Image (cartoon, rainbow, N blue to C red):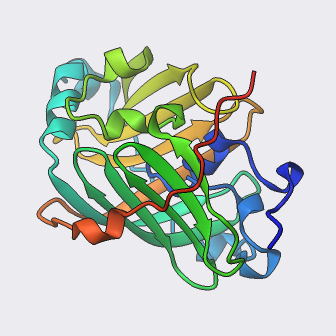
Amino acid sequence: MNRPSHKDRLPMPRAVAMACAFLMTGSALMPAAAQVPPPRPAQLNTPKASPAPPAAALKNEAPPSLERINGYLNGIRGLQADFLQIAPDGRQYPGVLYMLRPGRMRFEYHPPATLEVVSDGRSVMIRDKKMKTEPDKYFIGQTPLKFLLQPKIDVAKDAKLVDLKRIGPEIVMTLEDKSTFGGTSIIRVHFDGENYALREWTVVDAQGASTRVALSNVDLTALPDKSLFIVDEPKLMEPRN
């Protein structure tokens, strides 16, 4: 069976952004029939931002700590969460995220979408179960969320730290990664301002397309079965010059 042509596939940074967290697969990778039309504003199910605290209250808050971010992420052994992926065109794709550190991650989209994104710790596979084509496979180091999967997470070492600040009730970390497939990606990661829990991330790919992944119902006690993270053996995609 013929594989989709290159023009029908999205560059890897947008793909990974829209499935993961973690953010990460673009809407162009999904059949048109599987895409959910953008809901009316009243139907949007995205987290609502809390009003920003008074300036006086912000003065008494400790500055954001990269050490605490690294500590929180390194403390995750396993994770299961619901995710809502918001594509650059506003379409929304819900699903379930599974993570087993180090290195393993899986995004399962709810029907009618038929896409799966799986990392086994070495590579990331993007597969469309409906099309029955050979899945695409990429080195994990080419994905913008590789810093979430390292055996020892050191965010500032795995990517360039551009900014770290409090915005209202959240801590927002901005990273730049020049090693992602297709060009430089900008990753904005949102954490809870009190306990540093991971809330969401947005990846802006080399073409300027922005993809957001918001998490809910996060279960840090989950230890997903290793069978969820098996990657087939297609040839790994090499970076384009």
Compared with 206, 4 (above or below) is below
Q: Is residue 131 left or right of residue 61?
A: right
Q: Quadrant of residue 220?
A: bottom left
Residue 126: horizontal and vertical position, in percent?
58, 59
The answer to whether residue 65 shows anywhere in this view is: no
Query: Where, quadrant-wise, is the C terminus in this rendering?
Result: top right
Q: Is residue 141 left or right of residue 194?
A: right
- At x 40% / y 45%, what residue is drawn? 51
Compared with 87, 66 (above or below) is above
- At x 29% / y 57%, what residue is drawn? 99
Q: Is residue 40 left or right of residue 126?
A: right
Comparing 124 with 206, the one in front is 124
The answer to whether residue 128 shows anywhere in this view is: yes
Comparing 161 with 128, the one in front is 128
- At x 26% / y 22%, what residue is drawn? 154
Query: Where, quadrant-wise, is the N terminus in this rendering?
Result: bottom right
Q: Is residue 166 left or right of residue 123?
A: left
Compared with 47, 44 (above or below) is below
Residue 33: horizontal and vertical position, in percent?
79, 82
Comparing 125 with 19, the one in front is 125
Residue 101: horizontal and vertical position, in percent?
22, 48
Residue 41: horizontal and vertical position, in percent?
67, 69
Q: Quadrant of residue 227?
A: bottom left
| Total marks placed | 0
Q: Quadrant of residue 123?
A: top left
